[in-house]
Amino acid sequence: MSPRASRGAAPEDGSVARPARSATPAAGDASGGGQVHRALAILELLGDPESVGLGGRSGTVEAPTSFGVVEIARTLGRDKSQVSRLLRLLADAGFVEREAGTLRYRIGTRLFSLGVRAVSRRLRDEADALVEREAALLGERVEVCVRSGGSAMTVSTAAPDSELRAIGWVGRTVPLSCTAGGRAMLFDLDTAAVARLIVPEGLGQAGPAAPRSLDELVVRIAEDRARGLSIARHEMDRGLLAVGAPVRDAAGAVVAAVTVGGPDSRIDPVLAEVSAGVLRAAADLSAALGAPGTPVSPSGAGPPSRAPRQRRPPTTPPVPPTRKEGVS
C-alpha cells in the first residue's frame, strides 16, 4: 500500500479530507464534555459526600467535609494526576479551596455564593405563585418571610381581598420572637444561637401573650418544633392568631417560613384546616428548593376535592397594614 493510500485517499470532488471527530473527548481536552463531567463529579463529592455513601445520616460516622487528592481519585475511580489537574483548575476559579494545614480540598466560597443567589431567586419566584394559590384556597392572607437579623421580613404575600393586594406589605419587618413565621425560622437554632439573634435587638414590643424572656422564647420554640409548626396567639397583638411553618433548602436548612394570620375569631374555628394548608405550602416550597424528603402535593394545589374557603366579608373598610398586620 502506498503512503498516500495509508493516509486515506483524497475525495474525488477535490475537497480536503478531515479526520473523523471522536465521539468521546480526549482525556487531555480540558474543554471536552468528559472533562466537565469529571469536574462536576468532584464538586458533587466535595459538596455531598453522602451521595457516594461516605458517612452521613445513614452511615455510622459523620460525612467528611474535605478530601485529599488520593481519596477523591479512589472514590471516583479516576487517575490521580487527572484529578489533581482538575482540582487546580477548580481552585483557580474559586469553586474549591485547599486547606492550608492538611492540603485537603473542600467546596469553595464562590460555589456557596452562587448557590445562595440561586436559592434566593428561586425562593422569590416560587413564593409568588404559592401565596396566590394558598390565599385562594384558605381565604386568608398568606405570606412568605425570610430572616433579616432579629426580624422576619415579608418577601411575598397575597390575600383573597383584591383591594388589599397592592398595599405595601412586601419588605415589612416584625420581631422573630412573637410571630409564627419568625419562630418557625428558629427551629434549627440552639439557645446560644437564638440569643445571638434576639438579645442585641431585644424581644421588642408585642401583644399580651408574647414571650417576655429568652428562656420563655426558647420554651415556645421547643413546643412549636415538637408540633412541626408555630402557633402565635395574642402574641403580635391582642386578638391575632397566626400559624407558620419552616421552608428548607437543598441542604435541609431553614431559609424562610410560610405563615397565615388573622383575627382569632376567624382563624380559630378553622385552625386545623389553616395549619394543614400552611404545612402543605411549606412542604411544596421546600420541594421547589430541592429540600430532601419533601414531596410536592399533586399539581401543587392541595386536595382537589376541597373548594376554596370563603372568607367572611370584613365589617370595616380595608386599611393599610399596621404593625398588627405585617408578617404573622
Image (cartoon, rainbow, N blue to C red):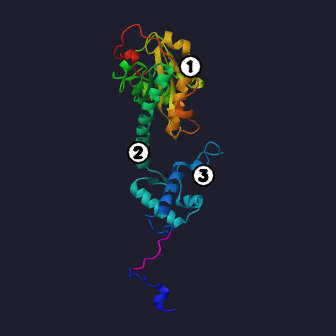
Q: Is residue 124 magenta?
A: no
Instruction: Name the residue tied to disc 2.
Output: 113
Q: 77 or 219: nearer the eye? A: 77
Main structural element of the magenta stretch: helix, strand or loop? loop
Instruction: Name the residue tied to disc 1.
Output: 273
Q: Is residue 74 in sight in this rendering?
A: yes
**Amino acid type, callout 1:** Glu
Magenta residues span 16-22
**Amino acid type, callout 2:** Ser
Residue 260 rendering spot, x and y as whole percentages: 48, 21
Residue 202 rendering spot, x and y as whole percentages: 40, 21
Disc 2: CA contacts within 10 A as few (<14), some (14-19) or many (>=20): few
User: Mark 1 falls on what kind of element?
Assistant: helix
Disc 3: CA contacts within 10 A as few (<14), some (14-19) or many (>=20): few
Q: Residue at x 43, y 28 (%)?
A: 145
Q: Is residue 84 above or below residue 20?
A: above
Instruction: Name the residue tied to disc 3.
Output: 52
The CA distance from mark 2 to mark 3 is 24 Å
Q: 241 or 320: nearer the eye? A: 320
Q: Residue at x 55, y 15 (%)?
A: 270
The earlier-in-sequence mark between 1 and 2 is 2
